[in-house]
Every structure is written in C-alpha cells, then in structure tokens.
Image (cartoon, rainbow, N blue to C red):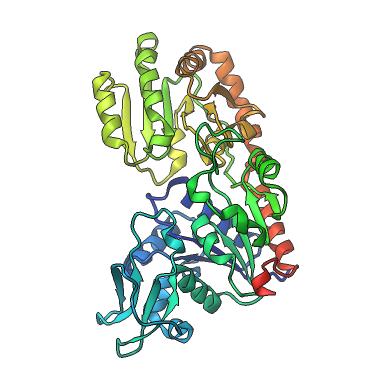
C-alpha cells in the first residue's frame, strides 16, 4: 500500500534522559515503519551534531531506530546547508532586548542567533527574532521566534502530502498556524490537570491556550479513553479527538512468585512520590525482613531520596539503581512493580511490567493505570493513601495464590496496549489523516 511520508517530531530524544516519553516516541516511529509507512524522526534540540550522531547510534544499538539516516535534527541540517533558512529570513536584523545564543558552523562562523527567554514557562511562543546570517556571517534577516524557525525547517523537510506526528505540546503551540497543507497529528503524553487531578481541577499552566488552538490539528491522539472523555466533557468536542495509546511488548509470564524483590521504574521527580514507597518499605521490612525495593531512574529527587533511605535505615533494603537501558531487565525476578505517581498520561511502565508478567501495585490516579489494571494483573490503591499502599504490598508478598493469579492475568491485561495492536491503530490513523485535507485554516 502506498503511504504518505510520515514524520515523528519531538523536541529531543536523548537515551537515558527522557524516560518513558523517549521510549514511546522511538517505539512509535519504529512500529510505523514496520507497518509499511516511510518514517523519519525529527528533533529540534540545539546540541552538537556529534552528540546527535551518538544518540542515533545508541538508539540503533538498542534496536529502537530502524535507520540512522531517518533521524534528523534541525541544527544538524542547518550546519550541513543553511540555504533553506536564509531563503525564509525576511525580518529585522536587530536583536530583541534579550541575550542570545549563537549557532555556528564547523569554522565558527555564525549561522543564527537564538533569543534566551527567561522566567516565562511559555518562552517558546516568544516572537523575539531569530537572527539569520549570510554566507559571510553577516546579519541577513530573521524569522519570528522559535515558531518561525521550526516552521521554516518543516516547510523545507516535509512535503505537502506528509503527515507530521507532533510529540510535544510546546511544538504543537507553534505549528497550529503552519501554512502548509501537510497534516498534523498531535499526541498527548501527560495529564493536563493540576492537583488534585480531578476532571474539574485547574488546568496546568503549561497548557494555557492549547485548547484554543487544538481544533487546528487533523487529529489529537489521547493515550486513554478516560482522559479523552474528561476533555470532551469539559472543553467540548471541536477537536478531532481519537484514542491511540503507546504500545508495549508482551512476553511469556515470568513474574517471580515467592520473590521478595519489588521494583519501581520512573524518573526521580517530585510528582512520582517515591518517598511514599520508601516510607512504606520501612514498615514492609518489619514484617518481611528480606524484602527489597530496587528503584530505577534518575532525576532531581535523587539526593533527597537517598537521604530518606539512610534516615530510615533502609540502605540494605532499598537501592537507587540509576538509569537502565533495557527496561525489561528491571523486571527479571521481580515480584511486582510499584507505582506511586500523583498523575500520569498513560503510565507506559504499567503496560511494560504487565507485558513481562509482572503484577503491578499502583495508586489509582488520572490517567492510565485503571485503564489497564481494570482488566487484571494488579492492585489499585487510593491515591496518596500510604496505609492502603502498605497493606497492598504486604498482601501481595504474603499471598502466593493471589500473586500467581495476577501473574497469569498480566499479559492478557496488557493486550489492550500490545505493540502490534497499537501500531496497526496508529498506521490506520496516519493513513486516514493523509486521505483528507488539513483542518488548519491557515493552510487552506
């Protein structure tokens, strides 16, 4: 089947730094390629070309990139040939009243200057000019902000019949006005709400304005039906909403009944509430002295969590394991996965654990865990209830019959997000979107 070219666009995709998001995006691109779509991955982070080459090589080594030649970066393209940006520059050559970072070629000659916008969570929407330089390194003109830069690059890279899967809200903010007939599919990876994360809770400030432009996308892909339902109820149905989750691998059930080892796989970030699990473990080891908890991931909370582990005398029972390149290895010989997050988009880790036959104990948060665990394979605990969390941990550690049942249920529960099922859904979505004119008024 002939397919329109497909482009998977993310701000950055750095191995070992971007967690479940990066795995989901790389997996989507890989699987769309396997479904017969011509796929190119695009990123816009301004790191050095050598760094991007190392990232591509690592993704390929892990078997998560189908072809290193089909993973491109805006600044790599700029350093190779800046003519596309020079032809798009027609604005002022006078910098805004802010500091600038300069992007240079291999000889040190300036190619462009990027404004540094501080103190504004929506810095990316600033129209402060991006200054463009000619072949001699002299100011030639500008494009309006990061949006002008990104739109110019996409107009150079993406043909009119292309489909761009936008994997970051910050990029979506800048592309709703893109004057190209190419189609845009906007994915959602996270919760749009603030605490207490109920459907009527305040909208996260980073989403400010997004719902006003969301009807410009040719599809908005929500990872769970629950989030899509809540959004439609609160913000109306003017968007082209679809439910299209991220996929996971499903293997042979291998959850280790009788094991006393639990795992967590997540960034060490405040919203993950890992301290809840550590405090619970202080009580767990009083009942099950050989119980251990391995915590995989890195983040800003590492120092605080390490201090808490020491304070509670858990150095022999709780270990911060750091980054892991093969997530499946985390679950080897694990009794269960523990998830204490305050909120999720989908909770990719839940499906990944179930796919290996590892049961899950999770706080019942919006969104994601309930969508999968309602089919079996785990235990949902009221969000933030540390007493209930402790009770669930001890129950699963001490009840081998319950544990064995959850192990047997896990792969079946994960089938709703199994990769082949999800990849076919995504391929059908891309082909459907490609078959209709874009919804963006600016491109008609």
Where in the figure is residue 85, as x and y percent of width and height?
44, 81
Where in the figure is residue 375, as x and y percent of width and height?
67, 29
The vertical placement of 314 against 134, above or below, is above
- The residue sitting at 49% across, 58% down in the picture is 170
Q: Residue furthest bottom?
A: 136
Residue 252 can be seen in this image: no
- Horizontally, is 163 left or right of 295 in the view? right
Identify which residue, 178 or 49, lies in the foreground. 178
Where in the figure is residue 93, as x and y percent of width and height?
36, 82
- Horizontally, is 11 left or right of 268 in the view? right
Residue 193 can be seen in this image: yes
Q: Residue furthest top?
A: 287
Identify which residue, 102 or 45, lies in the foreground. 102
Q: Quadrant of the C terminus?
A: bottom right
Tally of numbered tags: 0
Where in the figure is residue 72, as x and y percent of width and height?
46, 69
The vertical placement of 87 against 383, above or below, is below
Q: Quadrant of the N terminus?
A: bottom right
- Horizontally, is 297 left or right of 418 in the view? left
- The residue sitting at 65% across, 62% down in the picture is 216
The vertical placement of 325 against 170, above or below, is above
């Amino acid at each position: 089947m002939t397919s329109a070219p497909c482009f998977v666009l993310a701000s950055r995709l750095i191995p070992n730094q971007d967690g479940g998001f990066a795995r989901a995006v790389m997996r989507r691109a890989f699987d769309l390629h396997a479904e017969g779509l011509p796929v190119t991955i695009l990123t816009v982070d301004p790191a050095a070309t050598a760094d991007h080459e190392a990232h591509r090589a690592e993704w390929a080594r892990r078997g998560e990139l189908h072809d290193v030649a089909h993973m491109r970066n805006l600044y790599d393209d700029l350093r190779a040939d800046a003519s596309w940006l020079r032809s798009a520059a027609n604005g002022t050559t006078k910098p805004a009243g802010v500091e600038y970072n300069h992007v240079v070629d291999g000889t040190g000659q300036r190619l462009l200057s990027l404004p540094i916008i501080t103190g504004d969570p929506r810095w990316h929407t600033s129209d402060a000019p991006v200054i463009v330089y000619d072949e001699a390194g002299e100011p030639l003109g500008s494009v309006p902000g990061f949006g002008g830069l990104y739109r110019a690059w996409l107009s150079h890279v993406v043909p009119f019949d292309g489909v761009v899967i936008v994997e970051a809200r910050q990029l979506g903010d800048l592309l709703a006005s893109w004057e190209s007939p190419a189609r845009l599919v906007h994915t959602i990876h996270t919760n749009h709400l603030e605490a207490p994360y109920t459907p009527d809770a305040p909208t996260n400030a980073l989403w400010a304005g997004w719902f006003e432009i969301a009807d410009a996308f040719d599809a908005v892909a929500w990872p769970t039906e629950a989030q899509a339902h809540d959004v439609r109820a609160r913000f109306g149905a003017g968007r082209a909403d679809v439910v299209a989750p991220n996929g996971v691998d499903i293997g042979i059930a291998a959850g280790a009944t009788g094991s006393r080892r639990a795992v967590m796989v997540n960034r060490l970030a405040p919203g993950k509430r890992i301290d809840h699990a550590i405090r619970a473990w202080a009580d767990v080891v009083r009942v099950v002295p050989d119980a251990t908890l391995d915590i995989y991931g890195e983040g800003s909370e590492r120092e605080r969590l390490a201090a808490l582990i020491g304070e509670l005398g858990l150095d022999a029972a709780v270990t911060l394991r750091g980054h892991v390149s093969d997530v499946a290895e985390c679950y080897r010989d694990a009794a269960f996965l523990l998830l204490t997050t305050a909120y999720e988009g989908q909770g990719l880790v839940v499906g990944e654990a179930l796919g290996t036959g590892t049961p899950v104990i999770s706080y019942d948060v919006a969104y994601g865990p309930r969508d999968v665990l309602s089919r079996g394979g785990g235990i949902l605990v009221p969000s933030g209830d540390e007493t209930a969390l402790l009770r669930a941990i001890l129950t699963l550690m001490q009840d081998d019959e319950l544990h064995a049942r959850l192990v047997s249920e896990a792969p079946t529960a994960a089938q709703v997000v199994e990769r082949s099922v999800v990849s076919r859904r995504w391929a059908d979505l891309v082909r459907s979107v490609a078959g209709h004119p874009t919804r963006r008024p600016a491109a008609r």
